[in-house]
Amino acid sequence: MKPVSEFYNNLPKKQCANCGTVMDEQAESYKTQCPQCEGKDNYPA
Ligand SMILES: [Zn+2]
């Protein structure tokens, strides 16, 4: 079993779960979508 820290170190660049845009690693790590996609969520369908 590898340590969890090693798993995270091997992760590729973070991508938006919605459109696949590569996000800045310095961005808030808990977000799974880029700001553009998150903005769309603010609008009702
Ligand atoms: Zn996106």
Image: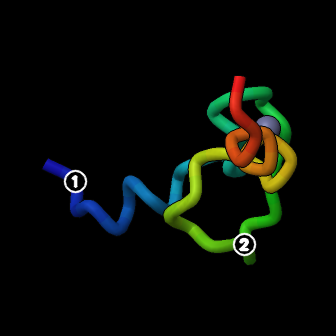
Q: Which residue is mark 2?
A: 27
In the displayed structure, 26 sits above or below 13; it is below
Q: Which residue is mark 1?
A: 2
The answer to whether the beta carbon of the residue marked 2 is less than 8 Å from any atom of ligand 1 is no
Q: Position of residue 42 (x, y in %)?
A: 71, 47
Q: Nearer the viewer, residue 30 or 24?
A: 30
Few, some or many residues within 10 Å of mark 2 (<14, 14–19, 20+): few
- The Cα atoms of the two marked residues, 1 and 2, are separated by 26 Å
Q: Quadrant of the C terminus?
A: top right
Q: Position of residue 8 (x, y in %)?
A: 44, 59
Snapshot quadrant of residue 28: bottom right
The answer to whether the beta carbon of the residue marked 1 is less than 8 Å from any atom of ligand 1 is no
Q: Position of residue 10 (x, y in %)?
A: 53, 52
Q: Which amino acid type corresponds to the residue marked 2 in the rendered image?
A: Ala
Point 76% across, 39% down: residue: 43
Q: Nearer the viewer, residue 34 or 3?
A: 34
Q: Which amino acid type corresponds to the residue marked 1 in the rendered image?
A: Lys
25 on left or right of 2: right
Q: Position of residue 9 (x, y in %)?
A: 51, 62
For label 1, the SS is loop
Point 27% across, 61% down: residue: 4
Residue reaching furthest to the left? 1
* Disc number for residue 28: none
Point 70% across, 33% down: residue: 44
In the displayed structure, 41 sits above or below 39; it is above
Q: How is the image coloured?
A: rainbow
